Image (cartoon, rainbow, N blue to C red):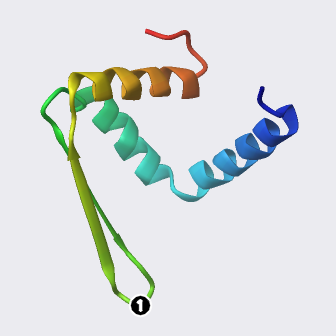
Amino acid sequence: MRNPAQLLRLKKQWDGFASRHPKLLRYLIYVSDNSLEEGALLDLTVTDPEGKALHANARLTAEDVVFLTTLRAVLDGKEQP
């Protein structure tokens, strides 16, 4: 079972992240509304402060799309699709 205090702490941290990075969140919402389909390629690069780039990618399966759609519904406070 989840600890309610941890969930409240996570909610506060999420709200802070969302206020610091609104363009990133708008982009992720756009992508999830328009591009998350089977066969899509998620491609992520993170560059650390020293300039070292770390790269990963994944091609989405039908199961991945269901998971990501369900996750978004949960984060939005909606019932599962």
Look at the numbered disc 1 and give the secondary structure of its residue: loop
Q: Using the rendered view, name the quadrant where residue 49 is placed.
A: bottom left
- Is 79 positioned to the left or the right of 49 in the image? right
Q: Residues within 10 Å of mark 1 (few under 14, many from 20)?
A: few
Residue occupied by mark 1:
50
Q: Amino acid at mark 1?
A: Glu
Residue drawn at point x = 29 percent, y = 23 percent: 63
In the picture, the quarter occupied by the N terminus is: top right
Name above or below for residue 13 compared with residue 60: below
Q: Residue furthest right?
A: 5
Name above or below for residue 72 compared with residue 29: above
x and y percentages locating residue 33 in the rendered image: 31, 27
Residue drawn at point x = 72 percent, y = 44 percent: 10
Q: Nearer the viewer, residue 63 or 43?
A: 63
- Is 5 positioned to the left or the right of 29 in the image? right
Residue drawn at point x = 80 percent, y = 38 percent: 8
Q: Nearer the viewer, residue 59 or 40?
A: 59
Q: Residue furthest left?
A: 39
Q: Residue furthest front?
A: 1
x and y percentages locating residue 78 in the rendered image: 56, 14
Q: Using the rendered view, name the quadrant where residue 11 is placed.
A: top right
Residue drawn at point x = 67 percent, y = 46 percent: 15
Q: Using the rendered view, name the quadrant where residue 6 is placed.
A: top right
In the picture, the quarter occupied by the C terminus is: top left
x and y percentages locating residue 60 in the rendered image: 22, 35
x and y percentages locating residue 80 in the rendered image: 50, 11
